[in-house]
């Protein structure tokens, strides 16, 4: 049994990792400052873990959180492109300064490995598809720059201090517990809630924008593999975490109409600033070096996601 620290444990991805690790009988410690995470995401598992309300910007709290820990899964972030365009300083503090704190604390506590929630936004709008890790990054938004800077810090801590770090470049992760209610929410969570309520969703752009939408179970599995793979295969390296398939927003809307029973139309609005047009991953590096496989495809993931939001909308029976 190993001990894991999950930063951002009350967030969508963090809380999914908590459940997966507890399910495997691992010891789990979690930190979250509830900036974007929610206590409800941990309700039924809180008693099985060591949860601490703390900010990754608090170095002392991070030092204490890293004590006795084998693996750190660093998910805490302000995960939004548009929010970073409005508030680049806030994005930089949480997404860069916070990461350096976690790394310093992990290094000094002699943690075995840190796995980092990096972002596909690092690739930016380079026309080449699919995106391969060896391609030069070309970040557009302050969010993308911050996530990429943290990636470089991860690699740097491996090179300078020998702390094993692995970066997983997430491509549009979606699934149950993703927050649908903020203007900065991921598109699939937002559409699920809106369409189930019969509200008209908005597509920014012409709808031909595409993404490699990746169901959460795939990201959870990538994290577990990134912890268990031999250091020679993965330490100090960056891996795409995706499915290798891209879906347009128009296709997404059509698929969600069937699943939600929404009868209306979609509204089209101008593209968002900082957005990229297409995103698609080459996942062969992760397959080769950490044994990654796509476990759940887009259609099945979307079905499970919409089912979950449907259940949330139902009143609890007395
Ligand atoms: C980006 C990053 C991703 C990061 C995420 C954090 C890329 C390729 N990906 O995702 O790594 O984790 O930010 O927020 O840069 N949209 C609509 N209607 C809506 C909401 C969104 O049409 O109501 C559109 C957006 O304009 C965008 C697409 O849907 O074109 C996906 O948006 P979103 O789910 O916010 O994620 P990304 O910005 O792609």
Image: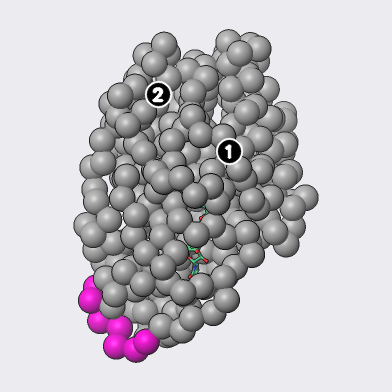
Q: Residue furthest bottom?
A: 264
Q: Which mark is residue 34?
A: none
Residue under the image location 63 percent in, 19 percent down: 157
Query: How far across and how far down the image is residue 136, in percent?
Result: 56, 34
Which residue is tagged 1? 137
Mark 1 and mark 2 lie on one chain; the one further toward the N terminus is 1
Looking at the rendering, the stretch of residues picked out in magenta corresponds to 258-265
The answer to which of 220 and 248 lies nearer the viewer is 248
Name above or below for residue 109 compared with residue 279: above
Residue under the image location 41 percent in, 60 percent down: 210
Query: How far across and how far down the image is residue 293, in percent?
Result: 26, 35
Which residue is tagged 2? 227
Question: Can you tell which quarter of the image residue 35 is in?
Answer: bottom right
Label 1 element class: loop
Q: Magenta stretch: dominant SS?
A: loop
- Please indicate whether residue 30 sits to the left or right of residue 175 in the image: right
Query: How far across and how far down the image is residue 279, in percent?
Result: 44, 52
Query: How far across and how far down the image is residue 302, in percent?
Result: 28, 61
Mark 1 CB within 8 Å of ligand 1: no
Residue under the image location 66 percent in, 42 percent down: 146
Residue under the image location 41 percent in, 46 percent down: 129
Question: Can you tell which quarter of the image residue 220 is in?
Answer: top left
């Amino acid at each position: 049994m190993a001990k894991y620290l999950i930063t951002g444990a009350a967030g969508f991805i963090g809380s999914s990792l908590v459940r997966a690790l507890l399910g495997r009988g691992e010891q789990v410690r979690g930190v979250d400052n509830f900036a974007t995470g929610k206590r409800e995401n941990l309700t039924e598992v809180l008693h099985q873990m060591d949860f601490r309300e703390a900010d990754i910007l608090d170095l002392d709290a991070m030092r204490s959180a890293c004590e006795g820990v084998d693996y750190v899964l660093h998910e805490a972030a302000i995960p939004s492109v548009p929010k970073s365009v409005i508030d680049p300083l806030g994005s930089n503090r949480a997404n860069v300064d916070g990461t350096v704190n976690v790394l310093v604390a992990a290094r000094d506590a002699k943690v075995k490995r840190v796995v980092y929630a990096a972002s596909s936004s690092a690739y930016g709008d380079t026309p080449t598809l699919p995106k391969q890790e060896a391609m030069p990054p070309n970040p557009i938004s302050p969010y993308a720059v911050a996530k990429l800077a943290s990636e470089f810090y991860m690699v740097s801590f491996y090179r300078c201090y020998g702390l094993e770090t692995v970066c997983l470049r997430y491509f549009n992760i979606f699934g149950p517990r993703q927050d649908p209610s903020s203007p900065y929410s991921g598109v699939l969570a937002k559409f699920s809630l809106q369409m189930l309520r019969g509200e008209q969703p908005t597509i920014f752009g012409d709808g031909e924008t595409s993404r490699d939408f990746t169901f959460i179970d795939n990201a959870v599995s990538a994290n577990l593999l990134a912890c268990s793979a031999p250091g020679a295969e993965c330490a100090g390296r960056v891996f795409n975490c995706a499915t290798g398939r891209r879906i347009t927003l128009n296709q997404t809307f059509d698929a969600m109409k069937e699943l939600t029973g929404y009868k209306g139309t979609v509204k089209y609005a101008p593209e968002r600033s900082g957005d990229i047009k297409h995103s698609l991953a080459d996942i062969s590096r992760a397959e080769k070096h950490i044994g990654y496989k796509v476990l759940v495809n887009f259609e099945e993931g979307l079905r499970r996601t919409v089912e979950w939001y449907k259940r949330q909308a139902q009143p609890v029976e007395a």
